[in-house]
Image (tube, helix red, strand yellow):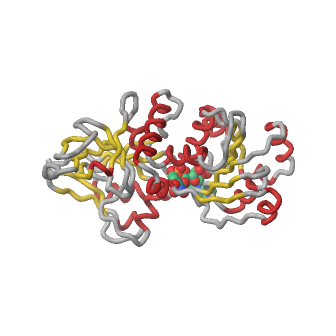
Amino acid sequence: MANRCIIYQQNGDPTQVLSAITFPKLPSPSPNTVNLKFLLAPLNPADVNTIEGDEPVFVGGNEGLGQVVEVGDGVEGLEKGDWVVMDKPQLGTWSTSRNVSFKDVIRLPSAGLTEAHGATMTVNPTTAYNMLSNFANLHQGDWVIQNGANSAVGQLVVQIAKERGLNTINFVRSRDDMEPLVKHLEGLGATKVLTYDDLEDRSLRGKIKEWTGGKDIRLALNCVGGEPTTAMAKLLGQDSHLVSYGAMSKKPLSLPTSLHIFKNLTSHGFWQTNWTKTHSRAEKEELIVKLAEMMKEKKIKAPEHTIETDEEATTKIRDVFAKVAQGKFGKKVLLKLEDVSA
Ligand SMILES: NC(=O)c1ccc[n+]([C@@H]2O[C@H](COP(=O)([O-])OP(=O)(O)OC[C@H]3O[C@@H](n4cnc5c(N)ncnc54)[C@H](OP(=O)(O)O)[C@@H]3O)[C@@H](O)[C@H]2O)c1
């Protein structure tokens, strides 16, 4: 049997530069490394930026779920069969198999988790959890406001907030048939679901005051940038925090100076990759265990997803990326690369 991986040898449009290649069985892992079989690996919006960018990474894939197949000498805390998630960016998870340092992965307590839970653990759930925890000191009954609420991160924000007893006001782009989306988000625990058009409604402020009982909203999470974010920031109360983690509209963020002067608004950016780089292994393990527990208890659902295999190799993977880029899937895409005959 031979292995398979998705590579790019130059940066550019993923639909042009990605190729699926076959490579021979890997040697046994050297000291302090483990051989992993990748069970599933997602395509995330940031992967497109990485491939388009100017830092070549030849085997693609940042996030994924690996299973330990073989353990090299000196490896601590991991054994054959364990599930692991990546603790280092761009390890090349769009691959059937890799040998990696045992220090670059974190053991995932797998009982009760699906492969989709594990494969999508380290980017979106960690981001949602950290944004809800690290900026405003929120208590049960407090309110959080967000845009891009139907994004994978947004849906996790809704679920984690619900688990913590926080209320959420969730903004999405309007669409012809809003009802299924509203029902879906409410089913996850959203307190209110509105559209960016509602932000232009002068009566919105009064409605929100009624819902919150006049309590200040002190945390806003921004996935999209542009005008809807400016309007959303104006709904924040005293000493509040706007945390930007995405720029899906590709429009710049503009904030009225008065919010800083009179409301003491603080505007932050959050990047999970930086959090991972700047936190200890113990802190990262603690977060993974917490999230795994919430998944096991069905407080966090795995994202709706489709699993794509690569039997048609390069054409298939480019086609998958083209659909992702055009938003045609509407679901998280998880890659499952299979061994192929050499
Ligand atoms: N900073 C971090 O650490 C971090 C971590 C994870 C993710 N992210 C970022 O967070 C964002 C969402 O990631 P995800 O995996 O959750 O994405 P996703 O599930 O693919 O969702 C994409 C979201 O973006 C919205 N969107 C797309 N194009 C838009 C546009 N032109 N104007 C307004 N909204 C638009 C979509 O709304 P529609 O349904 O209306 O199209 C949807 O809500 C990405 O930018 C990603 O890179 C950042």
- Report the side of 167 relative to 76 (left or right): right
Q: On screen, 119 above or below 271?
A: above
Residue at horizontal 40%, vertical 65%?
Answer: 51
Looking at the image, residue 47 sits to the left or right of residue 317; the answer is right
- The picture places residue 242, in percent across and down from the top left corner, at 68, 55
Q: Is residue 302 left or right of residue 70?
A: right
- Whether residue 150 is visible, yes or no, is no
Residue for point 59% across, 60% down: 247
Q: Nearer the viewer, residue 79 or 23?
A: 79
Which residue sits at x=40%, y=70%?
Answer: 12
Looking at this view, is 2 or 290 the one in front? 290
Q: Is residue 86 left or right of residue 178?
A: left
Count of numbered labels shown in the rendering: 0
The quarter of the displayed image where residue 57 is located: bottom left
Note whether 165 is above or below 228 in the view shown. Answer: above
Q: Do we see residue 208 in this rendering?
A: yes
In the image, residue 320 sits, relative to residue 158, either above or below, namely: below
